[in-house]
Image: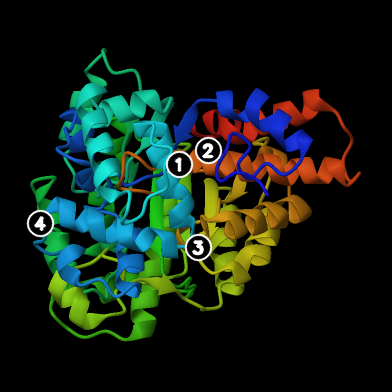
Amino acid sequence: MKKFMDQDFILSNEIAKILYHNNASKMPIFDYHCHLPAVEIAEDKEYENITQMWLYHDHYKWRAMRSFGIDEKYITGDASDFEKFYEFANMMPYLIGNPIYHWSHLELKRYFNVEDTLSAKTAKDIWEKCNNAIVKKNLTARKLISISNVVYIGTTDDPVDDLKYHKEINADDSFECEVRPTFRPDRALKIQNKDFCDYIKLLGKTEDTEIKDYDKLIEILEKRLNYFVDNGCNITDHSLERVYFKPTNKEEVASIFVKVLAGEEISIEDAQKYTTFTLIELGKMYSERNMVMQLHIGALRNNNTRMFNSVGADAGFDSIDDGEIAYSLSRLLDSLDVEDKLPKTILYCLNPKDNEVLGTMIGNFQGGQVAGKIQFGSGWWFNDQKDGMERQLIALSQLGLVSKFVGMLTDSRSFLSFTRHEYFRRILCNYLGKLVENGEYPYDLEILGNIVEDICYNNAKKYFIK
């Protein structure tokens, strides 16, 4: 029986151990997609206790706590921070098989030097150890980034953001990690949303104008994109709950847009036409600026109306959608590629049924002398656990080139989540090690080590940095 979470955690063969300890563990972290608030980095946020770090914004943990029968008072409610921590600790031993058990204990080890497993019995002692470490180690937001060996962070930002805090971070020479904004214009694309017209007004105000027609919308979006680029942005992101492709033209889309601004109802097909055309227009802008376009596909959001009305969005009430994506995604990418304006693109699927779809789709549009121009993104959200990562690695290996993969990201709002890179790196080394152990790949530590280091860091650096 192996000891729980020792130095060879997840590493089940000798090759994996060599690759992890000699190569993967030494590489810096290039966290190109997350949801860390730039204000907390700029102001070097301080924490009073472990609950503020761990439980304030973690919808993964919230979902588990609800499943355990814990009252909402101890999740998003007004219970004390210790009470919330205790309820989470009491649940912890029952998370067998859940990645939260691994993530949480990695975080306790790496940031707080806590070797004990968390439970109701150890809760008070671990609470005190963690809180003492926060003070003694001065575990602020920037300190957590530094000790995690993070050299690049890509935040996620709305086009209306003034990027004030990014400017402050970049002007501070004492902070070595590069923090760049990511352009995410979802609210400008989702014309069916109730707050769409309000958002268009807000978008216009950023450039001291009023958006009354589609031409002006595109003009303002391009101005905002230029503003982001001027402030270091080289990555964009889109959440596509469903992938639609509805052929249309500018005149029809312009008419649809004006109807919505006038308060008129439009059909679902009209909304899909608007989204299709606008996303293609944006894709062309990204290509012209040599930016990376990310498409996160397949989330079914805000399923619980009662809880959405109570605690809002991003609170743990989202799940995996099962829509068909292959044909529409193919036509969307091809519409850009036919004009040679398909930017570097990363495709993420939330439903693992689509792993092979994306694994084969990326091969349709490679080229342009860019290694891995179209990427099958890492196991995302419900798939950033051991099985999900392994399945993504297997699909990418068998259908593409895993050696050119840009690797892991946190996709998190927590400054403790950088341990997910360690989790991924262990899984990666174990997977490659098994191939060697099984005689499916030669024992060449130089090539294997290079592949591991590339996936962990080098590929991302080459891909994202102009």
Residue 140 at least partly seen: no
Closest to the observer: 417 or 176?
417
Instruction: Report which residue position mark 1 lands on.
Output: 106
- Dot 4 surroundings within 10 Å: few (below 14), some, or many (20 or more)? some
Closest to the observer: 30 or 27?
27
Q: Helix or strand or loop: what does disc 3 sit on?
A: loop
Q: How is the image coloured?
A: rainbow
Image disc number at residue 96: 3
**Mark 4 or 2: the one toward you:** 2
For the residues bearing labels 1 and 2, Cβ distance under 8 angstroms: yes
Q: Helix or strand or loop: what does disc 2 sit on?
A: helix
Residue 68 at least partly seen: yes
First along the sequence among labels 3 and 2: 3
Instruction: Report which residue position mark 4 lands on.
Output: 210
Q: Helix or strand or loop: what does disc 4 sit on?
A: loop
**Mark 1 or 3: the one toward you:** 3
Q: Which image quadrant is residue 207 in?
A: top left
Instruction: Report which residue position mark 2 lands on.
Output: 422
Residue type indicated by callout 3: Ile
**Mark 1 or 2: the one toward you:** 1
Residue 94, horizontal then vertical, whole percent: 43, 65
Question: What residue occupies the far front of the structure in this picture?
Answer: 121
Q: Helix or strand or loop: what does disc 1 sit on?
A: helix
Closest to the observer: 323 or 115?
115
Rendered residue at 35%/55% (across/down): 119
**Mark 3 or 2: the one toward you:** 3
First along the sequence among labels 1 and 3: 3
Residue type indicated by callout 1: Leu
